[in-house]
Image (cartoon, grey):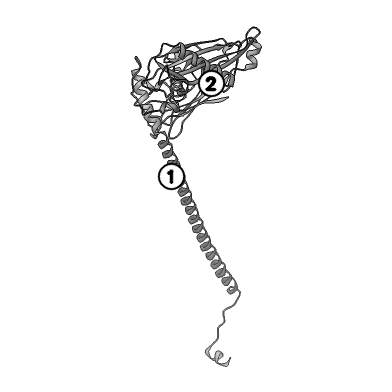
Amino acid sequence: MRELLILAVLCQGLFATSSPVCRIYADKAAADEAVYLINKLHHHGYKFKLDSFTLDKSLPGQPLCLTQLTLTLSETNCHIVNPKPFDECEVRKEADTPVTAKCNVSLCDGGEKPGIARLVCDTEPASSEELVRRCPDCPTLLPLHDPEGLESVKAAIEKFNKDSTQTSYFKLLEVGRLRTQYNMAFGMSHFAEFAIVETECPVSVKNEEKPACKPKCSNETHHGFCKSTQLGNGDLTVDCEIYDIQNTTQHPHPPFHRGKHCRHHERHRPGHHERGEHEKVLSIEVLLIMEALLLMEVLLIMEALLLMEVLLIMEAHLLMEALLLMEALLIMETMTIRNLTLSSLNHHSKGCPPVNLSLQDLRNA
């Protein structure tokens, strides 16, 4: 299992006082919005489609009311460089060892409308053992760093550039999949899927200069997706689909995209004006997320200090009450002792008859 994405997004009205009753109604529209954000913001691999979702619970609380969703996503055949909307992509077949994603989504009701508070996804490929049991002749997955698989990718890229009608040299962007299969006639064959990117170098660039070729700026470059097959006897075929230049937010930005200073221009996709506006707001929110989290930590610290102060005040009040009680008990004890003393004196004086002595008697005495 590997982590696909950890995303924290600042909800609108994050620190607004929330209603004690959760107003979020988690339906398929909310799940679809979460899938849209997942495909929008993860920068490697393939797009995903919603398979199923469940509503876990709603948690009223401060400062947000959170609703928890669990999503199950299926991997499609569309790489992220493919501009096709994810809901139009085909789900990968079982024989291709598809990847499944499990996502936990927190919806927040912190303002005028609900939003995504947090996304956490983990991905796991289908069991290779199960695939072998069901389809023993199907190709099996290889690690993306497999040396022989990468050599087949390198050879496929060189073949594409050699046979291509493109004017620019294309280089590897990332490897999407590597698979292998043994055949009695051809030996061990390798199947690869990988994304490529247009560089500043011409297609006729010399071999020794190719490693230094840098991709064009994202708003000027073409991306492509290729599938290659290299048989055990060395025969190689490669088929690449080159896409038109797209909005820079649609593609990954690996380190080698920073070869020169690039200016990025925002554009809306046709028919997606509302989502374009949402994306602008989302970009601002993502930039502010760390500041928001720090502010939340400060608020929590202040709340803890306030709680300590309240506890100290309560303790002081209890101490004062105890002192007053002790003082009252002391007064009561003093009065009791006094009453007992007077009672004792009165008791002794009752048994003594009065003595009448004259002045002469006193003198004689």
Picture coordinates of residue 112 (x, y %)?
36, 27
Q: Are marks 1 and 2 in contact (CB under 8 Å)?
A: no
Label 1 or label 2, whichever lies nearer to me, is 2
Residue at 45% of width from left, 47% of height from top?
305
Q: Which mark is residue 199?
A: none
Disc 1/disc 2 C-alpha distance (Å): 39 Å
Picture coordinates of residue 263 (x, y %)?
34, 26
Of 211 and 273, nearer the camera is 211
**Left/right of residue 192 with respect to residue 63 in the rendered view:** right
**Left/right of residue 213 with respect to residue 231 in the rendered view:** left
Picture coordinates of residue 277 (x, y %)?
34, 23
Occupied quadrant, residue 114? top left
What element does badge 2 sit on? strand
Q: Which residue is mark 1?
A: 302
Instruction: Tell me: residue 357, above or below residue 290.
Output: below
Of 186 and 301, nearer the camera is 186
Q: Residue furthest bottom?
A: 364
Q: Is residue 43 visible?
A: no
Of 64 and 121, nearer the camera is 121
Kind of residue indicated by mark 2:
Ala
Q: Quadrant of the C terminus?
A: bottom right
What element does badge 1 sit on? helix
Of 32 and 45, nearer the camera is 45
Counting labels gives 2
Q: Earlier in the sequence, mark 1 or mark 2?
A: 2
